[in-house]
Image (cartoon, coloured by chain):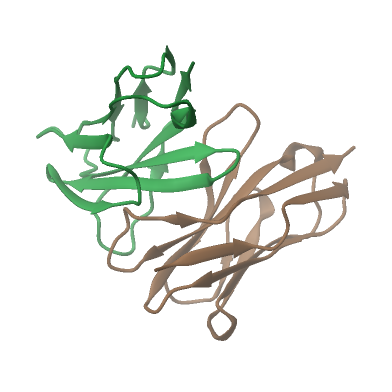
Chain colours: A green, B brown
Amino acid sequence: KAGVTQTPRYLIKTRGQQVTLSCSPISGHRSVSWYQQTPGQGLQFLFEYFSETQRNKGNFPGRFSGRQFSNSRSEMNVSTLELGDSALYLCASSLDFAGGYEQYFGPGTRLTVT
Amino acid sequence: AQSVSQHNHHVILSEAASLELGCNYSYGGTVNLFWYVQYPGQHLQLLLKYFSGDPLVKGIKGFEAEFIKSKFSFNLRKPSVQWSDTAEYFCAVTPNTNAGKSTFGDGTTLTVKP
């Protein structure tokens, strides 16, 4: 089975712009989660989607949003980019949201905001 | 709210030395526990997981971890490290009711000297 794929892998944007990142989960996985990884804050949970519904949201401002499509693919959007949004954004998928399932991580999208 | 604490930020060992990385978590309910590894330039990979049953779990590449419920701990061990184990190691916790919302520790960077 193909793993979790994320596009693009690298992105450079300027402050004030917006960006959309894409994630394709492993085939058959219906839960998709997003995380932000920075040297200072480590891995922080952004949000989780299951069956096109956001189930959980982390402690991030409203500029961070996401959605999931009927084929389980997911996108996250960051509007009005700030320098502090520079990070590695990781997507993870799992078969279901219930306990007893593990997450599989993609390679991430490296976002640099200048 | 759940939290995860990893005791060591940076560990330096010589090849063949034994490894133990500490992980403690805080959560009021039943949890699933994970150790992930991130090799330089690669994405997060699952080392091992604990859902239930035998508290001593074995993972890939000779790693094992022991869940001690009374101490809220899930320490990672390897009897003899190799240079190729140089990586960053993350402990993670998910509530048993929600596989998609992981809380990660800050990570431990392991450097193995040949």
Q: Quadrant of the N terminus of chain B?
A: bottom left
Residue at 36% across, 32% down? A4
Image side of residue B58 versus residue A86, left or right: right
x and y percent of residue B86 in the render? Answer: 74, 40
x and y percent of residue B56 in the render? Answer: 58, 72
Image side of residue B42 versus residue B102, left or right: right
x and y percent of residue A9 in the render? Answer: 43, 18
Residue at 33% across, 69% down? B96
Q: Would residue B9 be seen by someone viewing this image from the given angle? A: yes
Front residue (pair A24, B56): A24
Q: Quadrant of residue A72?
A: top left
Residue A41, placed above or below residue A106: below
Residue B32, placed above or below residue A13: below
Q: Residue furthest left?
A: A70
Residue at 34% across, 55% down? B101
Image side of residue B83 versus residue B95, left or right: right
- Total labels drawn: 0
Residue A71, placed above or below residue A62: above
x and y percent of residue A49 in the render? Answer: 21, 45
Q: Quadrant of the C terminus of chain B?
A: top right
Q: Residue furthest bottom?
A: B70
Residue B67, placed above or below residue A99: below
Front residue (pair A99, A50): A50
Q: Would residue A94 be seen by someone viewing this image from the given angle? A: no
